[in-house]
Amino acid sequence: MLFSRISRNLRGSFNSCRWFLSVGDQNHRFLFSHNVQSHTDSTQQVIRSLIFSKGFPALYSSRHQIHHQSSPIVEDEHDPFSLVADELSILGNKLREMVVAEVPKLASAAEYFFKMGVEGKRFRPTVLLLMSTALNLPIPKEPPPIELGGTMTTDLRSRQQRIAEITEMIHVASLLHDDVLDDADTRRGIGSLNFVMGNKLAVLAGDFLLSRACVALASLKNTEVVSLLAKVVEHLVTGETMQMTTTSDQRCSMEYYMEKTYYKTASLISNSCKALAILAGQTAEVAMLAFEYGKNLGLAFQLIDDVLDFTGTSASLGKGSLSDIRHGIVTAPILFAMEEFPQLRAIVEDGFENPENVDLALEYLGKSRGIQRTKELAMKHANLAAAAIDSLPESDDEEVRRSRKALIDLTHIVITRTK
């Protein structure tokens, strides 16, 4: 049974994350309010009881104990990105076609991060293409034909590829808007669009990408998927607003920080993974597992980003190091350091406009376990992501098994990356 496998795979302890379950039902609602709305009460109850009674697993399964070993995980001859390299190339070409605009300046701005060489590693499309294969399971009922581009088609893969395209456009649009809000001057190792072409054009380019994503989303003609990804855009705005308008207590709250991180980073990939399962006609339980993978992978990714902002270099990250703290953004390493050194809170509340406060905060961070505890929390979320994949219904299909292994490999890549 599916849930008996989940209970075996999600054993562990929440001991080092007690703040996450510190008070009452409100914290519980945050952890699961984003992924259970369309599922039955019994499904909610099972998942809640598994997570809240056992907590984060120390090891996510008996078969894959990778995050507590020193040896590299990626042993297959194919890394996760190479498994979908051909599809990623096609997806890149489609994206460049989808962002063509009649106004030359807008066209140049919209395609700025879709041009060959600056499109990034396409992490999110890679996850989604692998997840599409990983969910290639027998389904209770064949999904109805979907109209795409004026023709009727039952090509599930093409619809799932469309989700990957939509997700990447929403992601890049959010980057363009974030760079304006943060007054950033670099992105992916080159000048940010707002720095090169100005804030107004950068904002309009982001809006244009969102509009193109909406058109592509509507073409899927699936109201549940449309609702899911529309909610993602709302979450992006909510998360950014939470970051800009914090009270003193919220700024120093790990719970508030994790909720904001879900909205800004994890909602997009988690709901996109869920959308793939819905398009495939999978059960609510399978859709929830896809969601859980994306949510926890996204949280782990952002937590490591927080670490790299302190430990990485500007050249390796493609953006200025220490950019968060210099913009007054308090992230997990500082929050953990504050637990060890309460006097750091006064510095945080005073703000980081004064460079001396930045230096003092870094001094406290260096004396604390803030960096290590953030890595440990990222590892716990990576383990949860891997547990979700391990809990999917079993399959003998070699491509399905290979894609699932690649998704698990990605959890390791996320927490060991240096850029």
Image: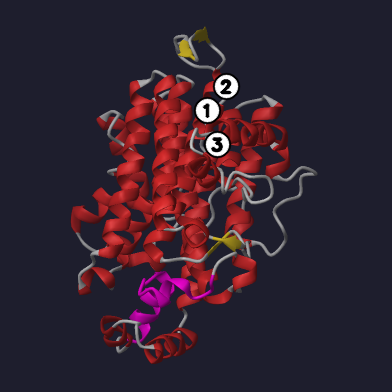
Q: What residue type is labelled 2?
A: Ser
Residue at the image point whose x is 35% and y is 75% from the top:
328
Circle 2 packing at 10 Å, graded few (<14), some (14-19), many (20+), is: few
| Quadrant where the image shows the C terminus | bottom right
Q: How many labels does the image show?
A: 3
Q: Distance between the residues labelled 2 and 1?
A: 6 Å
Magenta stretch: give its range: 320-341
- Measured as percent of width and height from the top left, residue 40 is found at 28, 28
Residue highlighted by disc 1? 162
In space, the residues marked 3 and 2 are separated at their CA atoms by 12 Å
Q: Is residue 116 shown left or right of residue 111?
A: right
Question: In the rendered structure, does residue 115 fall within the stretch colored magenta?
Answer: no
Identify the residue position indicated by label 2 in the image.
Answer: 158
| Disc 3: which residue | 128
With respect to residue 246, does 165 lie above or below?
Answer: above
Residue 312: image location, x then y, percent: 59, 73
- Residue at position x 61%, y 29% from top? 133
- Neighbour tally class for label 3: few under 14, some 14-19, many 20 plus, Cα within 10 Å: many
Magenta-colored stretch includes residue 325: yes
